[in-house]
Image (cartoon, rainbow, N blue to C red):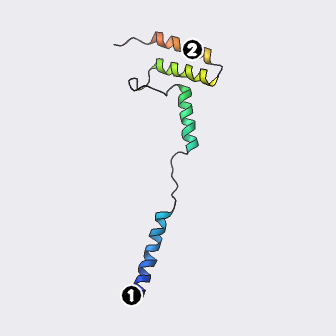
């Protein structure tokens, strides 16, 4: 009788134990997707943003775009520099 009970308990617990070791597929983003999103945000000038300027101001975004263009050798570096200067001049001073 004890043997029969032990077999029944083992048979019932086996499927539950197998699920604990099974790899679950996550519906989150892949590593490549996260890297692509980060690179896109850097190209758009959204990162990096200092703690005191969140969300980033137009001047910060323009400066980040200019730096990204310079670092990555894009042909829009001169246009970005001109846009950054205009954004800094257009932004009102805050105290």
**Where is residue 55 shown, x and y percent of the image?**
42, 26
Q: Where the N terminus falls, by quadrant?
A: bottom left
Residue 68 lies in quadrant: top right
**Where is residue 3 shown, x and y percent of the image?**
42, 87
The tag on residue 2 is 1
Residue at left offset 44%, top offset 20%: 57
In this view, the residue in front, 65 or 27, is 65
Residue at left offset 45%, top offset 69%: 17
**Where is residue 45 shown, x and y percent of the image?**
52, 25
Please report whichever mark, 1 or 2, sits nearer to the chain's N-terminal start.
1
Q: Residue furthest front?
A: 71
Contact (CB < 8 A) between labels 1 and 2? no
Residue 30 lies in quadrant: top right
Q: Residue furthest bottom?
A: 1
Residue at mark 2:
81
The tag on residue 34 is none
Q: Secondary structure at mark 1?
A: helix
Residue at left offset 56%, top offset 38%: 35
In this view, the residue in front, 86 or 68, is 68
């Amino acid at each position: 009788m004890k043997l029969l009970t032990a077999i029944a308990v083992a048979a019932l617990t086996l499927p539950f134990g197998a699920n604990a070791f099974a790899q679950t597929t996550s519906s989150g983003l892949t590593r490549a997707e996260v890297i692509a999103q980060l690179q896109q945000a850097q190209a758009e000038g959204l990162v990096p943003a200092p703690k005191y300027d969140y969300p980033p101001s137009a001047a910060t975004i323009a400066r980040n775009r200019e730096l990204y263009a310079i670092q990555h050798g894009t042909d829009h570096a001169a246009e970005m520099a001109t846009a950054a200067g205009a954004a800094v001049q257009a932004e009102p001073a805050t105290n």
